[in-house]
Image (cartoon, rainbow, N blue to C red):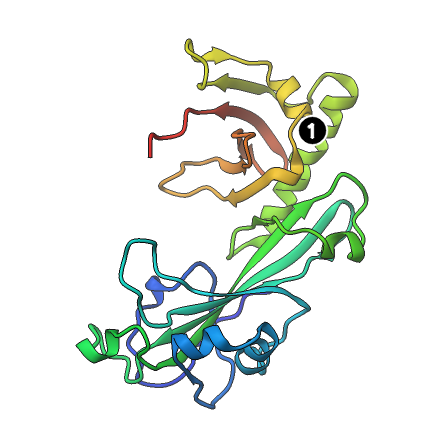
């Protein structure tokens, strides 16, 4: 299990609910203080050595210093994101993690003083969060092939293994549909991008899913309802609603017109 919980530092009042998905993880007792300017001047290797020195991790593929939204004033350093390189995880699966180092004001004041909101105000390392990722290759995964992958799906942070088992079960159904033209569970389909909201051939769509475009894997919730959602990105636009987990009971596949913004 990748996720562990802890908080770095004492007396910091940043709300855990405001941190990106993934549990908080302590990385050590020493203080790390950075400004945005200094973080942007450091190389990826320097940032890795400073910020992840007490946090076990694999090879880091890319590093991003968190940026403010375009059109808004530059804000102080809030986070640095490390993208771990993929590794083979059995079958066609690769796994990796997105590791986020979060920063807070020096004294954890909320709201911060005006001086603490300046673009280059110093920030103290507050916590680290990690999100489990996965992707499905077109062939048996190897470490070399997984290390070349750039786009990963996010598994449920609290239950990554359950998320993977559901993906694996739907993948098996997809392979079955491609080989036989049938599926062993009921499959319904609706393409809402057409003018008449046309029903579609669910088994055909299931057979043709591009698993390299798998996006978020979201377990049932009060917002999404009782089904697990598998989202396919990069132009595919399909969402697979999965009822049941072990075993899968049924699938509903749909595609909707994106919102106009």
Would residue 125 appear left or right of 175 to someone viewing this image?
left
Q: Residues within 10 Å of mark 1 (few under 14, many from 20)?
A: many
x, y percentage for residue 72?
A: 27, 57
> Which of the 4 image quarters holds residue 232?
top right
The residue singled out by tag 1 in the image is 174
Nearer to me, 63 or 14: 63
**Residue 223 % position (x, y):** 36, 40
Q: Where does the image place residue 250, in percent across and percent down from the top left? A: 57, 26
* Mark 1: secondary structure: helix
Which residue is at 49% across, 76% downward?
A: 41
Q: Residue furthest top?
A: 196
Seen from the viewer's position, the closer of residues 165 and 106 is 106
The quadrant of the picture occupied by the N terminus is bottom right
Residue under the point 35% across and 86% down: 10
Which of the 4 image quadrants contains residue 117? bottom left
Q: Which sits in the foreground, 21 or 256?
A: 256
**Residue 127 in the image: x percent, y percent?**
43, 75
Image mark count: 1
Q: Which residue is painted at 40% across and 29% down in the image?
A: 258
Above-or-below relation of 257 to 128 = above
| Residue at x 73%, y 16% (from the top left corner) | 181
Question: The C terminus is located in which quarter?
Answer: top left
Seen in the picture, residue 193 relative to 249 is either above or below; the reply is: above
Give the farthest residue toward the bottom: 30
Q: Quadrant of residue 180?
A: top right
Asked if residue 72 lies left or right of residue 42, the reply is left
């Amino acid at each position: 299990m990748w996720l562990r919980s802890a908080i770095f530092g004492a007396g910091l009042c940043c709300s855990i609910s405001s941190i990106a998905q993934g549990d908080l993880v302590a990385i050590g007792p020493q203080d790390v203080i950075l400004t945005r300017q200094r973080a942007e001047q450091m190389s990826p290797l320097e940032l890795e050595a400073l910020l992840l020195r007490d946090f076990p991790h694999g090879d880091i593929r890319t590093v991003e210093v968190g940026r403010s939204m375009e059109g808004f004033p530059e804000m102080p350093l809030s986070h640095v994101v490390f993208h771990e390189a993929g590794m083979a995880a059995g079958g066609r699966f690769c796994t990796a993690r997105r590791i986020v180092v979060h920063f807070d004001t020096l004294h954890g004041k909320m709201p911060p003083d005006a001086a603490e909101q300046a673009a280059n105000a110093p920030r103290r390392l507050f916590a680290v969060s990690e999100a489990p990722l996965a992707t499905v290759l077109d062939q048996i995964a190897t470490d070399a092939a997984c290390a070349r992958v750039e786009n990963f799906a996010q598994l449920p942070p609290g239950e990554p293994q359950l998320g993977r088992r559901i993906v694996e079960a739907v993948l098996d159904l997809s392979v079955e549909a491609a080989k036989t033209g049938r599926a062993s569970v009921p499959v319904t389909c609706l393409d809402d991008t057409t003018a008449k909201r046309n029903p579609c051939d669910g088994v055909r769509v299931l057979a043709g899913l591009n698993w390299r475009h798998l996006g978020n894997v979201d377990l049932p919730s009060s917002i999404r309802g009782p089904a697990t959602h598998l989202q396919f990105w990069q132009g595919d636009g399909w969402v697979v609603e999965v009822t049941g987990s072990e075993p899968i009971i049924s699938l509903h596949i749909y595609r909707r017109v994106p919102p106009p913004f």
